[in-house]
Amino acid sequence: MLDPMSALNVTAAAVQFVDFSFKCITGIIDAYQSISRTGTPAAFEKLQVAAERMLSSNSRLIKSLNQDTLLRELSDSETDVSDVATECVALATTLLDSLEGFNVLETDGSKWSEKLPTLKAAIKAVWNRDKLVSLHQKLKSSREELLYLIVLDLR
């Protein structure tokens, strides 16, 4: 017979396991059902579009702040803007590379063997969601820093 505290610990562990399992399964089901026509989970499509925009716009900004283009030395603020833009490009590239792993080839989904890659992508999406959210937050932070530097420079 278990003493009351041991029984409480066993019960708490069981409830925690059931809660964790439920969250994993519902997350996988949601991710599986949200795989879009492009083969990417719907939540990640917006991240991909945002990362592609950041990559494109910051690449253009870096190109325009090139000393050869300007035919002069960069000021301190321009150097800071260029450095942060370079950081944004690196973060956007990392985010896009991470998102590439979630693409699934389009199938008609009629056979289990065709559903398996989609299920794998859904499981990867659930397990890697925190990593992608972290990269997205870093990208947003760098973007805000870049905007701050540009506005400060306009002053």
Image (cartoon, grey):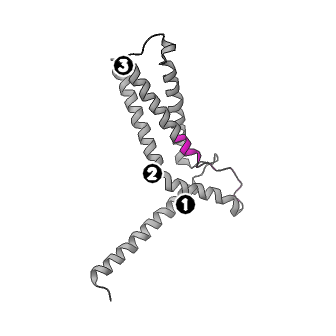
Element assignment for label 3: helix
Vertical order, 31 against 1 (above or below)? above
Reading the image, the residue beneath label 3 is: 76
- Crowding at mark 3 (Cα within 10 Å: few <14, some 14-19, many 20+): few
Q: Are marks 1 and 3 in contact (CB under 8 Å)?
A: no
- Residue 53: where, in percent of width, then height? 52, 32
Vertical order, 117 against 68 (above or below)? below
Q: Nearer the N terminus, badge 1 or badge 3?
A: 1
Viewer-nearest of discs 3 and 2: 3
User: Residue drawn at (52%, 21%), measured in percent from left and top?
Assistant: 63
For the magenta stretch, what is the residue range? Answer: 95-109
On the rendered structure, is 25 left or right of 108? left
Cα distance in 3D space between marks 3 and 2: 35 Å
- Crowding at mark 2 (Cα within 10 Å: few <14, some 14-19, many 20+): few
Task: Give amino acid for label 2.
Answer: Asp
Task: Give amino acid for label 3.
Answer: Asp
Q: Are marks 2 and 1 in contact (CB under 8 Å)?
A: no
Vertical order, 15 against 104 (above or below)? below
Element assignment for label 2: helix
- Residue 99: where, in percent of width, then height? 55, 45
Q: Which mark is residue 29?
A: 1
Farthest residue toward the top?
Answer: 71
Task: Give amino acid for label 1.
Answer: Ile
Q: Relative to the observer, which residue lies in front, 133 or 70?
A: 70
Vertical order, 136 against 117 (above or below)? above
Reading the image, the residue beneath label 2 is: 130
Q: Which mark is residue 3?
A: none
Quadrant showing the C terminus = top left
